[in-house]
Image (tube, rainbow, N blue to C red):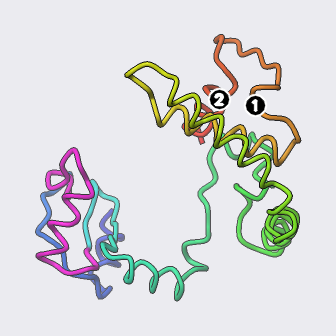
Amino acid sequence: MIQILLRMSRLRLPPGPPAIPIIGHLHLISNYPHHSYWELSKRYGPLIFVRFGSAPVIVASSSDTARQILQKHDQIFWWRPRTAVTSYLYEGRNILFSQPGPYHKLMGQVAFSRLSGNKRLESFRPIISSEIRQLLSNISHASNNVSVRGKLYESTFSIISAIVIGKSTKNISFRSPKGQSLVAALLEAVDLV
């Protein structure tokens, strides 16, 4: 810990508020973190240094600042932490979890060429239009209380599964040990990752 602090003291860090020992700046973050960062940015500028406990964090509070950082230092932020879940899923060798390098670059090119070409996207238009019509119909015929977020998740997963595996999530038979729907199981997997 002392070595980290010594190394950080030699760096030219952006301005930030005074920290409290052990908790750092956690006391400044409210239930709405984006509001807290906005308030701090009014006082300290678009680039702020804070500590969450002992973890140093640099917050870019404007889109221009974030864009500049990510364009200039994209190789630094490209790295992905390896967790037990990512190691278990495909041994970290799929496009989502692979580390930067030639393999990840190749996977990105293959995915882009297979899924993002103009002709390919145009071929998905009927699938997307159908799902959007279904979503709007479900929302308009529902009672007063509608979970729009849940309906959007269902539609998004249905579009993605129809594009990737050729079947909508509604047409996939799925049995979860917890009795969950396929969408609920996918959301749980996303949360675990």
Task: Say which residue label 2 marks.
Answer: 183
Task: Say which residue label 1 marks.
Answer: 169
Does residue 145 lie above or below 3 as drawn?
A: above
Does residue 141 lie above or below 89 as drawn?
A: above
Residue ID at (71%, 71%):
100
In front of the other: label 2 or label 1?
A: 1
Secondary structure under tag 2 reads helix
Q: Which residues are magenta?
A: 24-48
Rendered location of residue 92, percent (x, y): 75, 52
Rendered location of residue 86, percent (x, y): 68, 46
Given the image, on which type of amino acid does mark 2 rest?
Val
Q: Is residue 122 magenta?
A: no
Residue ID at (61%, 67%):
79
Secondary structure under tag 1 reads helix
Residue ID at (37%, 82%):
65
Q: In the rendered view, does 59 fall on the left or right side of 138?
A: left
